Amino acid sequence: MPQAFYRRQLPHLQVDDRQHFVTFCTDHRWILPEHVRSTVLECCLHDNGTRVDLRVAVVMPDHVHIIFTPLVDQEAMEVCSLAEIMNAIKGASAHRINKALGRRGRVWQSESFDHVVRSSEGLDAKIQYVLENPVRRGLVAEWTDYPWLWRKPFMNPFVLKR
């Protein structure tokens, strides 16, 4: 199974044919205004089907959780790297957020926290964790009511119980 590894301040391991659970946070845990959270979700969805096969994404007030499998870049004929995927999401969203708010500066912490999901049971648990995050934070009573959450249609119905 092909793997890639790179290190910034944290180590990052990519396994090409596996789901990756990634969390990235705003710089200094800055609270994103509600009207730009949709922008962040749009940026997470932008490369779905081209660079990533996205399973679930949630934009919380100060962080984002996403679960995806990297896909093959058809031009380069290689799997899209985790670094390229995250740079695309964070770079595009930061630019759009700063423009919308008339501000400059960093939006995201430079590092992200990633984990290769190794089993279907682990994947189900991680998806449930992402879906329930707004509920645990007291933002909504039901995850289905949270406006900045997206999940792939036709997912395992047992994971989506509530």
Image (cartoon, helix red, strand yellow):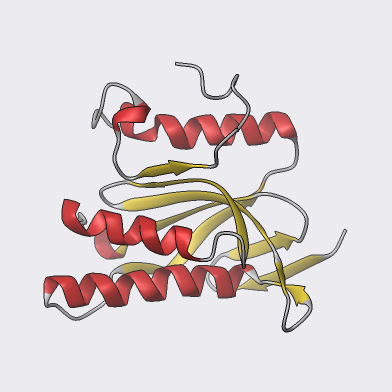
Q: In this view, does 90 lie to the left or right of 117?
A: left
Q: In which quarter of the image is residue 78?
A: bottom right
Residue 100 place in picture, x, y as percent: 17, 71
Residue 58 place in picture, x, y as percent: 40, 45
Q: Residue at x 35, y 52 (%)?
A: 63
Q: Residue at x 59, y 22 (%)?
A: 157
Residue 10 place in picture, x, y as percent: 56, 65
For the question of whether residue 131 can be seen, the reply is: yes
Residue 77 place in picture, x, y as percent: 79, 79
Q: Which of 7 and 118 is in front in this view?
A: 118
Q: Quadrant of residue 91?
A: bottom left
Q: Quadrant of residue 156?
A: top right
Q: Is residue 152 left or right of residue 14?
A: left
Q: In this view, does 87 lie to the left or right of 29?
A: right
For the question of whether residue 33 can be seen, the reply is: no
Q: Which residue is drawn at 38% across and 60% down?
A: 42
Residue most toward the right? 1
Q: Which residue is drawn at 56% across and 69% down?
A: 85
